[in-house]
């Protein structure tokens, strides 16, 4: 099934920034995007141990509740020397008593690398899994990856999350030092979106 001009799509998020970003990416296809938050839909509990599992939970919950196709993503940082951690728990590593603090999250990754006594290069990858679900229970899965390495101390104040400690393959600067449009050409989310658009958008 494909989506095109005049179709409506629910983005399974309560994050206004993510809604703005994805709405802009889909604007050329004439699809109207509304968020689960705008529809007053509850956020389902993410109980799976994989990106695809959690993205499926969010996408199917939104599609079932709204009666519309729904798109969800789940993403995170996987560090080779840490056995793939923090992975699906990336946001949890940045969680403090007062909310999310990605400086705290980056410090946790750094401390874990030091405790593991692993020498550079610290290979890592950002993963993004997109799931487009329909109310009939069917779905399509698209995965994107950005390979790179970690550095310390972090550099740059652009981007978000763990970007200031991540240098993509072929680059000398971190995602936190890149213009966001430059980063968007390289990112794991852009990789997944290219596959989604090719398969599912007219």
Image (spheres, rainbow, N blue to C red):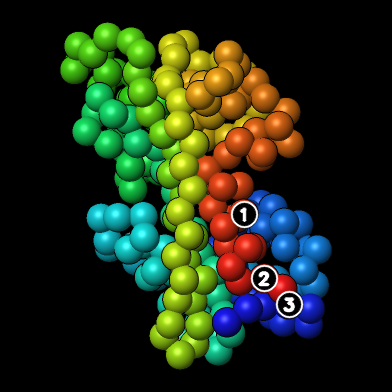
Residue labelled with disc 3 = 4
| Image-based side of 82 in relation to 43, left or right | left
Residue labelled with disc 1 = 194
Residue labelled with disc 2 = 201
Q: Callout 3: 10 Å neighbours few (<14), some, many (20+)?
A: some
| Image-based side of 8 in relation to 13, left or right | right
Label 1 residue SS: helix
Instruction: Name above or below for residue 26 compared with residue 80.
Output: below
From where the camera sits, is residue 36 visible? no
* Alpha carbons under labels 3 and 1: distance apart: 16 Å
* Alpha carbons under labels 2 and 3: distance apart: 6 Å
From where the camera sits, is residue 88 visible? yes
* Residue 17 place in picture, x, y as percent: 66, 52
Quarter placement of the C terminus: bottom right
* Residue 197 place in picture, x, y as percent: 64, 63
Q: Earlier in the sequence, mark 2 or mark 3?
A: 3
């Amino acid at each position: 099934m494909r989506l095109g001009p005049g179709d409506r799509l629910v983005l399974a998020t309560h994050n206004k920034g993510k809604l703005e970003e994805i709405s802009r990416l889909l604007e050329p296809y004439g699809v109207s995007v509304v968020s689960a938050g705008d529809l007053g839909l509850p956020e389902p509990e993410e109980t799976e141990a994989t990106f695809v599992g959690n993205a499926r939970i969010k996408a199917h919950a939104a599609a079932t509740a709204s009666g519309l196709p729904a798109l969800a993503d789940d993403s995170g940082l996987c560090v080779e020397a840490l056995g793939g951690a923090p992975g699906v728990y990336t946001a949890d590593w940045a969680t403090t008593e007062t909310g999310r603090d990605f400086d705290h999250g980056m410090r946790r990754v750094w401390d874990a690398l030091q405790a593991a006594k692993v020498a550079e290069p610290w290979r890592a990858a950002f993963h993004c899994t997109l799931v487009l679900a329909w109310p009939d229970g069917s779905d399509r899965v698209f995965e994107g990856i950005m390979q790179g390495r970690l550095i310390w101390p972090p550099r740059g104040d652009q981007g978000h999350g763990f970007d200031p400690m991540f240098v993509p393959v072929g680059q000398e600067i971190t995602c936190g030092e890149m213009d966001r449009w430059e980063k968007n050409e390289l990112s794991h989310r852009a990789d997944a979106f290219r596959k989604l658009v090719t398969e599912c958008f007219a």
